[in-house]
Image: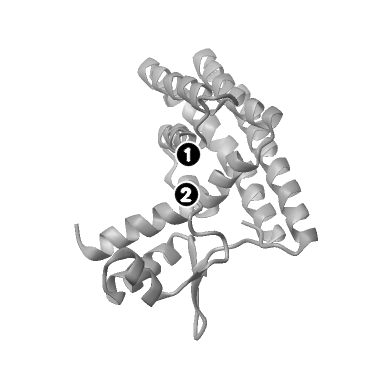
Amino acid sequence: MTSAERALGTLRDMIMGGDLAPGARLGEVELADRLGVSRTPVREALSRLAAEGLVEITPNRGARVATWTLAELEGVFELRSVLEPQLTAYAVPNATPADVEELDDLARRMVDTGCPGPRQDLDALVPLNRAFHDRLVALAAHPTLATALAAAIHPPIVRRNFLTYDEASLRRSLGHHGEIVAAFRAGDPGWARAVMTSHIANARAVMVRAARLQTARGEDTA
């Protein structure tokens, strides 16, 4: 693994994990010292992260962790509410029994990991959630919609969902995954589409409410 690849992985983890907050300035010299590398791999890593939507680079002002306005956040969920339910419906007839069992296992692990209580681990919940949703997209076998969805989803927003949820919203979100599995077992694309629509609406309500509160306080949205 090259220095640039190590810097990329470390910085991505720091952003995703919240160690580098939305809007935080990303100075090449400071990051190079912190990571124990030269400025060149840091510069390459920041360019890659900018392409992923995790970093914003402004000429003559440098780089910072990406932030989103309320309008941008609403736009993300507007796109997801159109694309993801349709992809989920497309996935249903393509799913084998083994695929359904894989989705069921992920849904159960998310409940075990994400339900409020002493064993809750939201950091571990994020990759499980991503694996579940990625599997739905793969099963849909619709590259055009998949590419559009990938451009609409920002990983820090997904992670922030789980940090922002109140208990009722989180339990509702976790329950949606199980119901999507039930729709797959029934071979019902319409049911799967409807549950995914509710799933996105639940996340949107939580995130937009939190963003409006932040905007009212004059804070960054992320």
Q: Are marks 2 and 1 in contact (CB under 8 Å)?
A: yes
As drawn, 87 above or below 191:
below
Q: Nearer the viewer, residue 8 or 194?
A: 8
Q: Is residue 75 left or right of residue 58?
A: right
User: Which residue in the structure is indicated by mark 2?
Assistant: 17
* Residue at image point 39% right, 15% down: 97
As drawn, 221 above or below 78:
below
User: Which residue in the structure is indicated by mark 1?
Assistant: 123
Mark 1 Cα shell of 10 Å, populated few (<14), some (14-19), many (≥20) = some
Q: Amino acid at mark 2?
A: Gly
Q: Nearer the viewer, residue 130 or 149?
A: 130
Q: CA distance from mark 2 to mark 1?
A: 7 Å
* Residue at image point 51% right, 52% down: 18
On the image, which quarter does residue 5 sit in? bottom left
Mark 2 Cα shell of 10 Å, populated few (<14), some (14-19), many (≥20) = some
On the image, which quarter does residue 102 sit in? top left
As drawn, 150 above or below 96:
below
The C terminus lies in quadrant: bottom right
* Residue at image point 61% right, 32% down: 196
